[in-house]
Amino acid sequence: MAGRDPGVIVRRAQRFDVVLPASVRIGDEHADVVRFGPRAGDRQGWAEGDLMDIGSAGAGFIGTVFFPRGTKVVLRIFDLGKRDDEPVLEVPGKVVRVIMTDRRPAYLIGVGFQGLGAEDAAAVEELIERFGDPTDPNEIT
């Protein structure tokens, strides 16, 4: 679109508010480039947090670990109250937004889904139907 600031991130799909347990790790493509300290995640590199919103093109995750913008990641989403069970969804993505939320520190991390197959896309839609509360389209997030 002519005149658009190239630094402005525009969502491709509506997001729905959720609060679900989730975890994120660096994707294999960036495992040699981005490394965490020993306290940042578990032994397999998963950093825990909470999924805050989800849409067909991406999700918002809040956690205490910083992920650089542009990093390829893998996002796991768990059923409500079942972080120790198998994830209901595990999808690849790319960090498109990072915002420090307050002094804790905590980070709101926007992840754009990448390479979703038909099965994963259907699982995302099922999560939205089960848990999604439409966000206000006029709200700036």
Image (cartoon, helix red, strand yellow):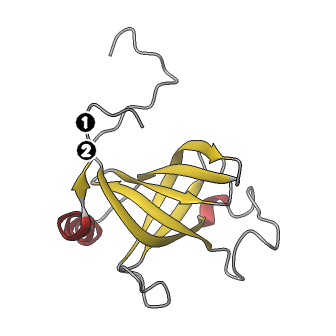
Question: Residue 141 location, x and y as percent?
Answer: 42, 37
Number of disc labels: 2
Q: On the rendered image, what quadrant is the N terminus found in?
A: top left
Q: Which mark is residue 106?
A: none
Q: Which residue is drawn at 62% across and 74% down?
A: 46
Q: Name the residue under label 1.
A: 137
Which kind of residue does numbered mark 1 sit on?
Pro
- 15 left or right, relative to 74: left
**Which of these two is toward me, 9 or 15?**
15
Which kind of residue does numbered mark 2 sit on?
Gln
- 17 left or right, relative to 7: left
Q: Mark 2 points at which residue?
A: 14
Q: Which residue is drawn at 56% across and 55% down?
A: 72
**Which of these two is toward me, 24 or 63?**
63
Question: Residue 114 location, x and y as percent?
Answer: 41, 55
* View extreme (bottom): residue: 85
Q: Regarding mark 1 in the picture, which secondary structure is present there?
A: loop
Inter-mark Cα distance, 2 to 1:
8 Å
Q: Tell me, yes or no, whether the two marked residues, 2 and 1, touch with CB atoms within 8 Å.
A: yes
For the residue carrying disc 1, how many other residues have a C-alpha within 10 Å: few (<14), some (14-19), or many (20+)? Answer: few
Residue 90 higher or lower than 112, as above or below: below
